[in-house]
Image (cartoon, helix red, strand yellow):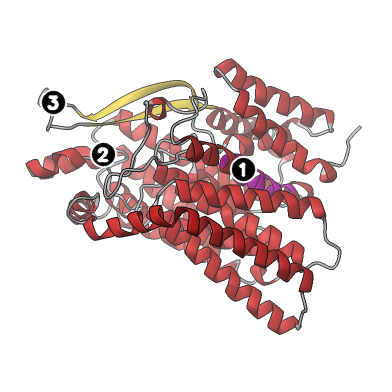
Amino acid sequence: MRRHLKKYYWLIWLIPLMLMILVFNSKAYILVFLLFGMTLFLFGQNLFQTLFYMLILSIPFERVIRGWWLTVVPFDSQAWVYGYEFSFGISLKLIFSATLFLLILLRRNDFKVKFTSNIYILSLIGFFIFACISSFFAFRYDLMITGLIRLWMSVWIFFISRYYFSKRDIRLSFPKYLVSCLLFFGLIGTLQFIKRQPLGLDMEIESSKALFGFLTSDGEENYRVQGFMGHPTYFGSFMSLIFPVGLGMLVGEMFKKKKVFLVQLISSIALLLGFSAIFGSFSRTAWFSLLIILVLFLKKIRQTIRFERLKLKKDTKMFLIGGLIVVIGIVCYGSLILFRAHSLKYMWTLGSGRGRLPLMKHSLVMIKNNPILGAGFNHFTSEMIDQGVEDKHRAFIYPVHNTFLLFFSELGIPAGVLFIIFLMTTLFYSRRKINKDWIDYGIWIGVITFIINAQFHTLFSQDPTFDLLMVMLAYLSVDL
């Protein structure tokens, strides 16, 4: 007998996430998902909905069941001649995505989906088509196939999420999932920040098990929180993507006449832990995104109070308490903030800026040389070597630190333009929804943080930010 999940949403998401702390090997990792799936069956969810829930739960985790390293630029015996390689593996979210896709193909008569010719749908389809065409002209098919698989998964995640978000119960559970992720990853990041080293959990990737983990490379050395992700900048971007959702849930609850204490409690804890984790990432871009989030929310709160002429005496106290916590944090960690901010002075001389500019120049050359189809998926570094790299830049052989430039460079101008159209039109057409609901506003602001962070980082393929972005865009696109 099917049971209504609404009153169990928090438990359904928080329990499996917290169980991840106990994961010690791949079998335990898979067991958590099996228990999660069995629980959903007990609540009367069918196979397809259960697989979708499991897919959503798996999105933040990059842990693979079977993985490989692909060398793009070979390493040299001389220490200053760097190479580049990246990892690709069979993850649970890839397994769930492929399984759902195949099952729906077999049972397609049961999935009556009305095709809509909205500009954002057509631009996303066009983006993927151009990526496929570009891939067939790539020099190395192993690099092309892995990139195409990753992009296919993200595009498929958008369409399957859009289908299931049309169902009210699943749609209602999604914000609670995002806030649960904020609480869980905020807890992991905060514990790492307190210990000033990786936790040693098996869920952490191999590179994070170094004795001291990642340190800031310019200015005073500080340990950088990275959660379960490959780099602190990825973690900071991911957390700033979901932080405004927690803020939207808390603020929205404060404006309700009938408030739910549990929602206020969970969202408050999640925000506090998330704020600490973002700070501990020492990602200046994530810090800037956090500032933008707070400014936009304060502006909307002021407009709402003025428009509705509300008097929020009790809730004002909660805002003051939250502000006091932030002030205390700034006082306690003010020196770290100042040191990190001061490092901007040396970014273009001693910091990563001295490598980022040459990468952008190489990107522009690639776009000029391959304007229609690009250099091919995962071919950026090899194409950069062919273009010629100065000896002083050999230590910075990475893809360009800009997601949009990466698409333009590897997939061509048409694909890059279509992706931007998809992103911007979804935001544009969903803007009317954000005035009605604070949570929708938080998700909308979360997408804005992706645009900010994507200007300085490659948020595709090597971290889960892009996949979660596609789910959030699918959520915003429903009923447009």
User: Residue 244, how many percent across, how many down?
Assistant: 59, 58
User: Residue 14, how many percent across, how many down?
Assistant: 70, 38
Question: How many numbered marks appear?
Answer: 3
Magenta span dominant secondary structure: helix
The answer for how far apart the CA atoms under marks 1 and 2 are is 33 Å
What's under tag 3, amino acid-wise? Answer: Asp
What's under tag 1, amino acid-wise? Answer: Cys
Who comes first in sequence, dot 3 or dot 2? 3
User: Residue 141, how many percent across, how many down?
Assistant: 30, 30
**Residue 176 is a magenta residue:** yes
Residue annotated with mark 2:
379
Q: Residue at x 30, y 59 (%)?
A: 342
Please state, as top left, top right, bottom left or bottom right, where the N terminus lies in the image: top right
The mark lying in front, picked from 1 and 2, is 1
Q: Which mark, residue 98? A: none
Residue 297 vertical position relative to residue 156 in the rendered view, above or below:
below
Q: Which residues are magenta?
A: 173-185
Dot 3 crowding, Cα within 10 Å, few <14, some 14–19, many 20+: few
What's under tag 2, amino acid-wise? Answer: His
Left or right of residue 429, residue 375 in this image = left
Which is more toward the observer, 13 or 363? 13
Q: Which mark, residue 76? A: 3
At mark 3, the secondary structure is loop
Residue 23 vertical position relative to residue 419 in the rendered view, above or below:
above
Which is more toward the observer, 368 or 300? 300
Residue annotated with mark 1:
181
Who comes first in sequence, dot 3 or dot 1? 3
Left or right of residue 19, residue 203 in this image = left
Left or right of residue 127, residue 412 in this image = left
Q: Residue at x 43, y 32 (%)?
A: 197
At mark 2, the secondary structure is loop
